[in-house]
Amino acid sequence: MMGRPVRSRSPATVPPPASTELRSTKISFRSRKIVKAPPAKPLATTAAPPPAAAAAAPLLPPVLPALSVPGEVAAALRHLQAADPLLSAVIASTEAPTFAASPSLPAFHSLARSILYQQLATSAADAIYARFLALLPTASAAAAVTPAAVLALAAGDLRTIGVSGRKASYLHDLATRFAAGELSDSAVSAMDEPALLAELTKVKGVGEWTVHMFMIFSLHRPDVLPCGDLGVRKGVQELYKLKALPKPEEMAALCERWRPYRSVGAWYMWRLMESKGAAAKKKKGNVSS
């Protein structure tokens, strides 16, 4: 950010020459002309030119915190264990999360993948995603999924691999917005949560839940609370022994103590419900045997 322009100082005022003291003299015969010496000219001073304006620094996207930064997950666990004794017990009995330190998929690719996986079992979504990549002109998954490549696929092409007509329209809308410059990988990576929610939910088929999952698992943002996720809501209900599923406002109030690591707290809510499900399944198996 440019600082205020520095004003040049006015030249230092040069003091006038000291006046010569004239002694009064009594002239007895005739008057004399008193020749006065001309005043000394002030010394010429040259004002220093104002400093050149500093060149504007290039505007770089803000560096936002990420759970993939070394040491960030450990810092999150220390904070959560100190802030919430009930969550601390879950952390102690569960393996710590890991977030890939290597660069994740580009934003467009990740969002397209999220659309493909919506409302599908993981195994079915994996199969469709693999067929989707096979439709594209290059075998390199990281480079293949581009707005132009997706726009080149007709809705019929996508339907042949199991993508519904509605999801095909979602993919094309996402690709159109990226191709038009409304969205870009770099802009998306630099946006904070309110901006991401505002911009990405303009895309057909992308809602708040999809944006929250994108922020946690693609951008690795540390402080996202997916209040609409059923697994997280059930986990909070189980953790705090609530009679009913908490509403978003109640979730926000209960999980406020997790800030600035609510993403990690949410991750443990998923694990808490998985462990509860596994324990119930094991108990049922023991009873039936």
Image: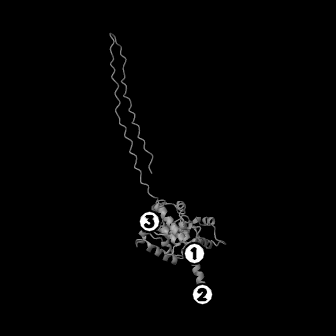
The x, y position of residue 102, in whole percent, is 43, 69
Q: Quadrant of residue 134?
A: bottom left
Does the CB distance between marks 3 and 2 fall below 8 Å?
Answer: no
Q: Which residue ends up furthest to the bottom in the rendered image?
A: 289
Check residue 286 in the rendering and tell me which mark sits there, or answer none: 2
Q: Secondary structure at mark 1?
A: helix
Q: What's the residue at 60%, 70% (across, down)?
A: 233
Dot in front, 3 or 2? 3
Local crowd size for mark 2, using a 10 Å CA cut-off: few (<14), some (14–19), many (≥20): few
Q: Mark 2 is on which residue type?
A: Asn
Residue type, numbered disc 3:
Ala
Q: Residues within 10 Å of mark 3 (few under 14, many from 20)?
A: some
Distance CA(mark 1)–CA(mark 2): 21 Å
User: If you read the primary sequence from the N terminus, does the residue marked by circle 1 or circle 2 appear first?
Assistant: 1
Q: CA distance from mark 3 to mark 2?
A: 55 Å
Q: Give the residue number, with chain letter if any, for mark 3.
A: 148
Instruction: Pick whichever, 91 or 16, lies toward us.
Output: 91
Element carrying mark 3 = helix
Residue 224 in which image quadrant: bottom right
Q: Residue 250 occupies which quadrant of the picture?
A: bottom right
Badge 1: few (under 14), some or many (20 or more) residues near its Cα, within 10 Å?
Answer: many
